[in-house]
């Protein structure tokens, strides 16, 4: 079984490859579109988790992004 650090490295590499691919195909506009799409999906997931847990979306987001 892989450690979380190994999974994180693979995930980081995949994201880097995806961003590089989008940038090479769509430039700044492509990266902007990707950012908006990812933000919209994150909002959907936060709302889904909040509904499943009976919590406010802002509380779920705070848990995700608190340092």
Image (cartoon, rainbow, N blue to C red):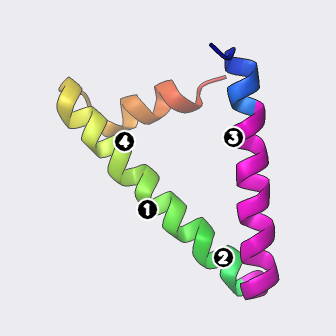
C-alpha distance separating marks 2 and 1: 12 Å
Given residues 37 and 3, the one toward you in this image is: 3
C-alpha distance separating marks 3 and 2: 21 Å
Is disc 3 placed on a helix, strand or loop? Answer: helix
Asked if the residues shown at circle 1 and circle 3 are in contact, with their CB atoms under 8 angstroms apart, the answer is: no
Which residue, given by chain and number where applicable, does mark 4 sit on? Answer: 46
Asked if the residues shown at circle 3 and circle 4 are in contact, with their CB atoms under 8 angstroms apart, the answer is: no
Disc 1 packing (10 Å; few <14; some 14–19; many ≥20): few
Compare marks 2 and 4 and give the one earlier in the sequence. Answer: 2
Compare marks 3 and 2 and give the one earlier in the sequence. Answer: 3
The answer to which quarter of the image holds residue 59 is top left
Which residue, given by chain and number where applicable, does mark 1 sit on? Answer: 40
The answer to which quarter of the image holds residue 11 is top right
Q: Tell me if residue 40 comes above or below residue 28 in the rendering.
A: above
Which residue, given by chain and number where applicable, does mark 2 sit on? Answer: 32
Magenta region includes residue 27: yes
Compare marks 3 and 4 and give the one earlier in the sequence. Answer: 3
Is disc 1 placed on a helix, strand or loop? Answer: helix
* Residue located 82% across and 81% down the image: 24
Which residue, given by chain and number where applicable, does mark 3 sit on? Answer: 11
Residue 67's x, y, as percent? Answer: 67, 22
Given residues 66 and 14, the one toward you in this image is: 14
Q: In which quadrant of the rendered image does the N terminus lie?
A: top right
Q: Tell me if residue 33 comes above or below residue 65 in the rendering.
A: below
* Residue located 79% across and 46% down the image: 13
Residue 65's x, y, as percent? Answer: 58, 32
Compare marks 2 and 1 and give the one earlier in the sequence. Answer: 2
Instruction: Tell me: 30 left or right of 17.
Output: left
* Residue located 70% across and 75% down the image: 31
Compare marks 1 and 4 and give the one earlier in the sequence. Answer: 1
Magenta range: 9-28
Residue 7's x, y, as percent? Answer: 68, 28
């Amino acid at each position: 079984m892989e450690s979380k650090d190994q999974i994180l490295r693979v995930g980081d590499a995949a994201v880097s490859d995806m961003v590089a691919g989008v940038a090479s195909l769509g430039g700044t506009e492509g990266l902007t579109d990707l950012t908006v799409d990812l933000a919209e999906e994150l909002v959907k997931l936060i709302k889904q988790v909040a509904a499943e847990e009976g919590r406010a979306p802002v509380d779920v987001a705070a848990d995700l992004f608190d340092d």
